[in-house]
């Protein structure tokens, strides 16, 4: 038991070192030259008001540009509720099961 | 080292987040862990607000409180202590 | 829980909480917020009512038939709003391409189908929260 803890600790520290090096290489938060600010977000910011007529840009993306994703998000919610009801509902109507 | 938009108040809040997540793992009483999760959610909503995303702040506050309530219901139906 | 102070405070506060939730749902496209957050707030108002006033009175406010109907037809409402575009000769879930008048920017009636879709999603999320809570509470411990 004691013998196995040291290699595990070593592997964990190595993984933490890799993650920290990767984080240190990230560009600063919120700068204009970051790779996140490409032409996709630029296109949304420039065209969202004319193409959707909605002031809140997040709603414009969630419910207009990506409306198909949101539809299946609601179906996922429906499936979750279905699973909970099937698992937990114990009351049986008359003439239901045996 | 360079410009960052994360000021010292946000850094303190992020540290509180780390401490709260570790505390949730180590606390054995599940009800206390859920209470710590409520505090975690509040601080997380403040961090989102600090980063200029009020949309996600509102959603985080509402969904976090909903999760806290549902977890408390589950605890009231099952055992409170871990093991 | 049958506490007198809790009941009075809830009777004073819960209408405003519900109004806030409906406001967040209806103004999801002009101000911060959205249908998911507003729906959760509306559902939490009902959950708070049930925890304070008891399971029977909470169930009388939201019968099982209502939650079942909203659960089933809320998802279908989204699909029907998408079919509006198909019937007008545009892709599924099209808004401006279907030729719908978008209205003035920033008004409550702007956005065409987006407000209607948001209303449906908000009511559905509220019903999801209520259904989860009642299913867990009515189960035998």
Image (cartoon, coloured by chain):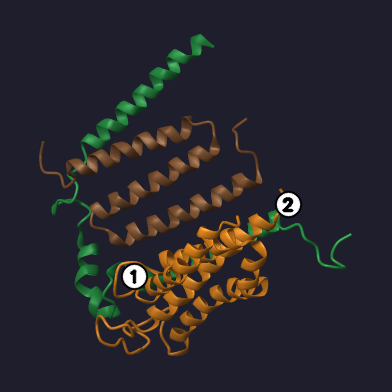
Instruction: Work out how far the residue at label 2 is from the one at label 1, CA to CA, in angstroms.
Output: 41 Å
* Residue tagged 2: C140
Q: Which mark is residue C76?
A: none
User: As displayed, is residue B54 above or below residue C24?
Assistant: above
Image mark 1: chain:
A
Q: Which chain is brown?
A: B
* Quarter where residue C38 is shown: bottom left
Q: Position of residue C37 (x, y in %)?
A: 41, 64
Quadrant where the N terminus of chain A is found in the figure:
top right
- Answer whether residue A95 is visible to the viewer in this image: yes
Q: Tell me which residue sits at (64%, 39%) in the image.
A: B79
> Observer-nearest residue: C141 or A42?
C141
User: As displayed, is residue A58 above or below residue B67?
Assistant: below
* Quarter where residue A46 is shown: bottom left
Q: Tell me which residue sits at (77%, 60%) in the image.
A: A91
Residue C48 left/right relative to C68: left
> Observer-nearest residue: A41 or B32?
B32
* Residue tagged 1: A59
In the structure shown, which secondary structural element does the residue marked by tag 2 occupy?
loop
Chain A representation colour: green
């Amino acid at each position: 038991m004691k013998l196995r803890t040291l290699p595990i600790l070593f592997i964990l520290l190595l993984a933490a070192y890799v993650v920290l090096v990767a984080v240190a290489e990230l560009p600063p938060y919120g700068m204009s030259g970051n790779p996140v600010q490409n032409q996709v977000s630029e296109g949304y910011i420039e065209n969202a008001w004319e193409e959707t007529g909605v002031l809140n840009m997040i709603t414009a993306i969630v419910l207009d540009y990506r409306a198909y994703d949101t539809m299946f998000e609601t179906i996922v919610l429906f499936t979750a509720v279905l699973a909970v009801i099937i698992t937990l509902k114990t009351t049986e109507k008359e003439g239901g099961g045996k | 080292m360079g410009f960052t938009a994360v000021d010292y108040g946000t850094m303190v809040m992020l540290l509180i987040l780390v401490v709260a997540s570790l505390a949730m793992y180590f606390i054995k009483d599940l009800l206390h862990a859920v209470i710590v999760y409520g505090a975690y959610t509040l601080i997380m909503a403040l961090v989102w607000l600090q980063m200029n995303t009020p949309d996600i702040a509102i959603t985080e506050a509402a969904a976090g409180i909903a999760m806290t309530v549902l977890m408390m219901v589950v605890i009231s139906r099952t055992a409170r202590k871990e093991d | 829980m049958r506490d007198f102070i809790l009941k009075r405070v809830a009777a004073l506060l819960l209408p405003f909480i519900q109004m806030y939730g409906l406001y967040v749902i209806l103004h999801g496209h002009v101000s911060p917020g959205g249908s998911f957050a507003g729906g959760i707030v509306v559902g939490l108002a009902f959950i708070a009512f049930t925890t304070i006033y008891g399971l029977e009175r909470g169930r009388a406010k939201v019968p099982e038939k209502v939650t079942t109907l909203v659960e089933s037809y809320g998802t279908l409402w989204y699909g029907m709003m998408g079919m509006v575009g198909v019937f007008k000769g545009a892709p599924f879930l099209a808004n401006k391409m279907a030729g719908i008048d978008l209205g003035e920017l920033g008004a409550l009636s702007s956005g065409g189908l987006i407000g209607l879709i948001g209303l449906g999603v908000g009511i559905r999320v509220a019903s999801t929260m209520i259904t989860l809570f009642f299913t867990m509470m009515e189960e035998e411990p």
